[in-house]
Image (cartoon, rainbow, N blue to C red):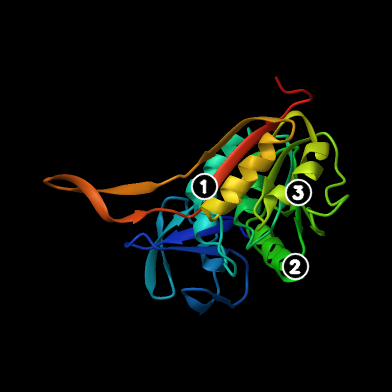
Amino acid sequence: MDLKVASGDRVVLMDSDGRKIAVVVAPGARRVGGLGVLDPSPLVGAAFGSTATVGNRRFTVLRPSLLDLLETLERRAQIILPKDACHILLGCDISAGKTVVEGGAGSGAMTTALAWAVRPGGRVITCDVRPDSLRQARHNVERAGLAEVCSFREADVTAPGGIPERDIDAVVLDIPEPWRALDGAWEALRPCGHLACYTPTANQAEQSVRALRGRRFIGVRTVEVLEREMAVVEKGIRPSFEMLGHSGYLTFARKVLETL
């Protein structure tokens, strides 16, 4: 792994307050959100982990992690937050070489997390009925340098034939009525493949679970992930006054050929 920034690299600049800005280091002036118009090419040759002056400000130059990419994503729709995205990756056993179908593109945050996890050798197929959502997701995935493992399709995964793939490893649904896509998801999944539904409301989660229990899925469970940061100061530690609370319910299940 290169220790210094090269032309074409994606880097994250972090200021002294912890704010992050994602930049592609290439010649030519361009508008960079949070920095204005500048030419980032002087960063070429800077060591990752060192500090550099960009414009009139000092930053630490970081090699982007998945969390960095998700935190600097260009958003339009509400995204699946990192606390939920990492739980989906674990709950669906998503790793290098896996094939995943995603229903609902949003702004591409979950797409980015899935693409990061399936490299090398994996594939993410993202479906949405809205072309503007697909464009935004594609933009963010390309910006993260992960386009080679992703494909985007304008399709309704709740319609018959909406998921034509077969023997895939996981289906992740972030759509208003995921229960309408369960038959198609079951047909698409390999035996023991994983399903995840992200639903903002309890009623959606309840209906998803009821529908799953009426089909050949097992291990059906719903969780809510709450994240509370600790404020560590010189004289002790206390919970932060701000808590990252409810964002959505995560419902997981696995396809089987027969139920007990």
Residue 127 in the figure: left or right of residue 35: right
Amino acid bearing label 2: Arg
Question: Label 2 neighbourhood size at 10 Å, few (<14), some (14-19), many (20+)?
Answer: some
Gap in Å between the C-alphas at discs 1 and 2?
A: 23 Å
Residue 123 in the figure: left or right of residue 251: right
Q: Residue at x 68, y 42 (%)?
A: 211
Q: Tell me residue 30's x, y (percent).
A: 59, 77
* Closer-to-camera residue (203/20): 203
Precedes in sequence: disc 3 or disc 1: 1
**Residue 6 visible in image:** yes
Tell me the tag on residue 181. Answer: 3
Tell me the tag on residue 84. Answer: 1
Q: Residue at x 47, y 51 (%)?
A: 48
Callout 1: SS: helix
Q: Tell me residue 140's x, y (percent).
A: 64, 62
Image quarter in which the C terminus is found: top right
Q: Tell me residue 245's x, y (percent).
A: 39, 53
